Each structure stands twice: as C-alpha cells, then as structure tokens.
C-alpha cells in the first residue's frame, strides 16, 4: 500500500516533470519563434535603414548636383555676360579706332589735297604772271581758270592777289561793254559769248548783274530756255531792282515751262499772278495752259537790245542803264 502510494507520487512527479518539460519545450519553441520574428523585423529594419540611407545619399547627391548645376549656371551666365560685355567693349573700341583712323585719313587726305591744290594754284599763278609779263592777255586769262587765290600760300597771295583781281576786273568790264555793243549791233552770239566771259572773269563784280540780265534776256529771245534758266536762277540771288526781279521771276517760270519743267514753272507763275505785277496777265496764260495741258502762249517778236533785252509784257524796252552803274538794289 505504501509502495503504491510512492509509486503514484513518483508517477505523478514523472508526469509533472514531463509536463514541465513539454511546457519548457513549448516555451523554448515560442522563444525561438520570437527570436526568428525579431530577426525578420531586424532584417526589415536593416533593409529600411539601408534604403533610407540610400535615399538620403541619393537626395544629397541630387542636391549636390542641383547646387553644382545652379552654381555652374550662375558662373556660366556671369561669364557669358562678361564675354558679351567684353565683345561690346571690343566692338566699341574697334569702332572708335576705325572712326579715329577714318578721321585721321580724312585729315591726311585733306592736307594732301590742300597741298596739291596749293601747288596747282601756285603753278597757275606763276603761268599767269609770266603771260601777263609778256603781254599775252589771252594766255594769262586761260590760266585764271585754275587760280583760286585763297588756296595759294601767303607769299604767293601777297605777290599775285592784286594783279589777279585787277586783271579780272579790267577784262570783265571790257567783256561786258563788248558784249553790250555786239548785242546792240545785232551780233547776238558774239555778244552773249562776251557776256559769259565777263561773268566768268568776275561773277560778283561791278558789271556782273547787268551782264547776267542781258545774257538771260537774250537767251530767252534766242529760245535757249535751259541756259536761260541757269542764268535767271543766278539773277534771283543778286540784289536787283524790284521791277527787274519781277521780270526775272516771270522769265524763269516761262523758261521752265518751255523747257518742260511744268510743275516748277506752274508754282512760280502762280506766284507772279498773285503778286499782281505787269507780268501777271502773261503769267495767267501760261498757268491756264499748264493746268489744262494745252499749248503754251505764242512768243512775241523780240529784238536784241544793247543793255537789256525786251521785257515780256512791256510795250517798249526801258532805257539802257549807265554801263558804269550796277542795277539798283532792292
């Protein structure tokens, strides 16, 4: 009985021990499972850490690249601006240098041209003086075409100026008087040649205005309208009597009309009409013809006169002026 109890207790202990062992084994297994779970979580955390580290590295790399790009862009832009500024400065300097060179070349050319012109003028003066000394007036006059006293050197000016001026004045007066005489005698072509010579010798001399007037009116009478226009334009710049100025304006408009310059002629002749001078009626005929495109008024008969040509629109020519007195200024 006693053994049975001990056996029972022993069995009981064995059972409890076995149960405890099973429980311990289960706990060990659970612990192992927990450890494996921890390992998986650790691996996951490690992977996440690696990914995070990799992401951070990538972000840092991107930031560095972006920063480097921005810095490079800024530097490149700044460098580009500097290059453009340098190019602009170089272009400006080149332009200034070219301009300076051009100005210097212009000055050199001007100086060389002035020196060349001075040599030509002084050579012509020397030729003129030699012919004048030999009483060869025609050859001396031919040399005058190349003489411009102001272009000569001071010494040559002092030597020749008075002689050139005196020669021009004397021969211009003689040519004017010869031209007037030829025209009065009916030798119109010879007279106009002398009048041109007088104007060429002394364009603004004592007899220049009378010579220009007589030449212009006779060119008109000879129907040489293109030549008359040039002389009449020259007449308009001179100080002349108002009556003569009115006639010159009419003759200029009529000459332009007959030379085919209808627009300018119409403008001038309308001014003559508006002015109400004695040439207004004659101008009205021209204006009407020019505006309608019809034929111009017929030319009146004209005869050369000794000092002035017949004035269109006047019944009789005015008396010839004193050959020694210029036409009265305005």
Image (tube, helix red, strand yellow):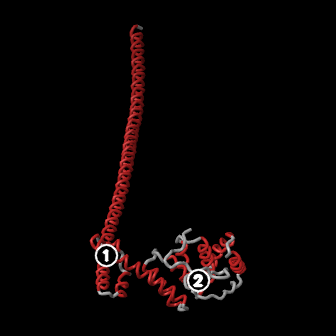
| Residue 226: percent from left, percent from top | 56, 83
Disc with the residue nearer the chain's start (1 vs 2): 1
**What SS does tag 1 mark?**
helix
| Residue 96: percent from left, percent from top | 35, 60
| Residue 60: percent from left, percent from top | 38, 40
| Residue 180: percent from left, percent from top | 51, 85
Looking at this view, name the residue that lies furthest to the top. Answer: 2
**In front here: 14 or 101?**
101
Is residue 315 visible to us here? yes
Q: Is residue 76 left or right of residue 159?
A: right
**In front here: 80 or 203?**
203
Q: Is residue 161 left or right of residue 8?
A: left
Cα–Cα span, label 1 and label 2: 37 Å
In the picture, the quarter occupied by the N terminus is top left
**In front here: 40 or 295?**
295
Q: Vertically, is 18 above or below 298?
A: above
**Residue at (40%, 21%) from the top-left corner?**
18
**In front here: 291 or 229?**
229
Crowding at label 2, few (<14), some or many (≥20) Cα neighbours within 10 Å? many
Q: Which mark is residue 309?
A: 2
Q: Is residue 207 left or right of residue 54?
A: right
Crowding at label 1, few (<14), some or many (≥20) Cα neighbours within 10 Å? some
**What SS does tag 2 mark?**
loop
Q: Vertically, is 221 above or below 59?
A: below
Identify the residue position indicated by label 1 in the image: 160
Q: Is residue 320 left or right of residue 45?
A: right
In the picture, the quarter occupied by the C terminus is bottom right
CB within 8 Å, label 1 to label 2: no
Which quadrant of the figure has residue 201?
bottom left
């Amino acid at each position: 009985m006693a053994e049975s109890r001990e056996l029972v207790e022993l069995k009981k202990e064995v059972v409890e021990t076995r149960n405890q062992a099973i429980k311990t084994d289960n706990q060990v297994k659970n612990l192992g499972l927990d450890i494996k779970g921890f390992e998986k979580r650790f691996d996951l955390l490690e992977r996440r850490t690696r990914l995070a580290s990799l992401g951070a590295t990538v972000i840092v790399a991107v930031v560095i690249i972006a920063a480097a790009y921005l810095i490079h862009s800024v530097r490149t832009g700044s460098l580009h601006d500097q290059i453009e500024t340098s190019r602009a400065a170089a272009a400006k300097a080149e332009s200034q240098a070219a301009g300076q060179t051009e100005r210097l070349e212009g000055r050199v050319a001007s100086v060389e041209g002035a020196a060349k012109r001075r040599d030509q003028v002084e050579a012509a003066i020397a030729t003129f003086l030699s012919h004048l000394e030999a009483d060869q007036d025609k050859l001396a006059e031919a040399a005058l075409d190349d003489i411009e006293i102001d272009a000569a050197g001071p010494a040559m000016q002092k030597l020749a100026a008075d002689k050139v001026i005196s020669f021009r004045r004397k021969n211009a007066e003689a040519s004017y008087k010869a031209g007037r005489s030829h025209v009065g005698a009916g030798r119109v072509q010879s007279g106009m040649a002398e009048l041109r010579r007088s104007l060429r010798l002394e364009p603004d001399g004592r007899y220049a205005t009378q010579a220009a007037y007589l030449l212009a009116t006779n060119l008109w009478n000879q129907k040489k309208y293109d030549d008359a226009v040039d002389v009449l334009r020259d007449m308009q710049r001179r100080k002349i009597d108002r009556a003569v100025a009115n006639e010159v304006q009419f003759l200029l408009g009529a000459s332009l009309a007959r030379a085919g310059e209808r627009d300018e002629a119409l403008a001038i002749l309308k001014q003559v009409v508006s002015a109400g001078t004695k040439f207004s009626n004659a101008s009205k005929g021209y204006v009407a013809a020019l505006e309608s495109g019809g034929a111009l008024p017929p030319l009146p008969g004209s005869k050369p006169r000794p000092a002035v040509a017949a004035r269109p629109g006047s019944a009789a020519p005015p008396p010839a002026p004193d050959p020694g007195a210029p036409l009265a200024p305005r």
